Amino acid sequence: MEIRTIKKDYKIFKKYSIPKECVLTLDDTLNQSVIMIQTEKGKLQEWTRGRKNIESFLVYGYVRIQKNCPHRIGKCICEKCSLFVIKNGTGDCAHVWSLFRK
């Protein structure tokens, strides 16, 4: 997994403890930071974008789906959540990201 970041976000991400499986790369060609993951065929593919999504991954271990989550009115069920939503780059659920952290 690789976090490609713009200069503005690089310092922010360095403050967090970066998981061993993540590589933080500065990329001036981007207009916003992205997380890239390796597909089954070994190719890197964009998974989620945006500073808030990446900060969420670094802090909580998953990308919060925020306004798309049906549990947003109540309490987030975090690791118990089995949602899988990738819509307009908003990220996905705790369950899926926890698989990458193992």
Image (cartoon, helix red, strand yellow):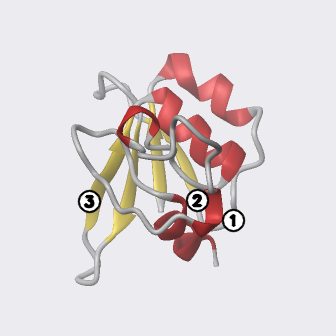
Q: What residue is drawn where x is 52% and y is 40%?
A: 54
Query: Quick one: SS at disc 2?
Result: loop
Instruction: Give the spatial CA distance, label 2 vs label 1.
Output: 5 Å
Where, by quadrant of the figure, is residue 77 drawn?
Answer: bottom right
Q: Do the residues labelled 2 and 1 touch (CB within 8 Å)?
A: yes
Give the labeled residue for mark 3: 45
Q: Residue 37 carries which label?
A: none
Q: Is residue 77 depicted above or below 87 in this figure? A: below
Q: What's the amino acid at mark 1?
A: Lys
Task: Report x, y in % for residue 66.
Answer: 46, 35
Q: What's the amino acid at mark 2?
A: Cys
Give the labeled residue for mark 2: 22
Q: What residue is drawn where x is 63% and y is 65%?
A: 79
In the image, is 78 to the left or to the right of 4? right
Query: Quick one: SS at disc 1?
Result: loop
In the image, 59 versus 30, the foreground residue is: 59
In the image, 77 versus 92, the foreground residue is: 77
N-term mark: 1 or 3:
1
In the image, is 34 to the left or to the right of 55? left
Give the labeled residue for mark 1: 20
Q: What's the amino acid at mark 3?
A: Gln
Instruction: Give the spatial CA distance, label 3 vs label 2.
Output: 14 Å
Q: Is residue 6 depicted above or below 1 in this figure? A: above
Instruction: Give the spatial CA distance, label 1 vs label 3.
Output: 19 Å
Q: How many marks?
A: 3
In the image, 12 versus 90, the foreground residue is: 90
Query: Quick one: SS at disc 3?
Result: strand
- Crowding at dot 2, Cα within 10 Å, few <14 / some 14-19 / many 20+, comes out as some
In the image, is 16 to the left or to the right of 57? right
Task: Report x, y in % for residue 78.
Answer: 63, 57
Q: What residue is drawn where x is 70% and y is 43%?
A: 59
Task: Report x, y in % for residue 42.
Answer: 29, 78
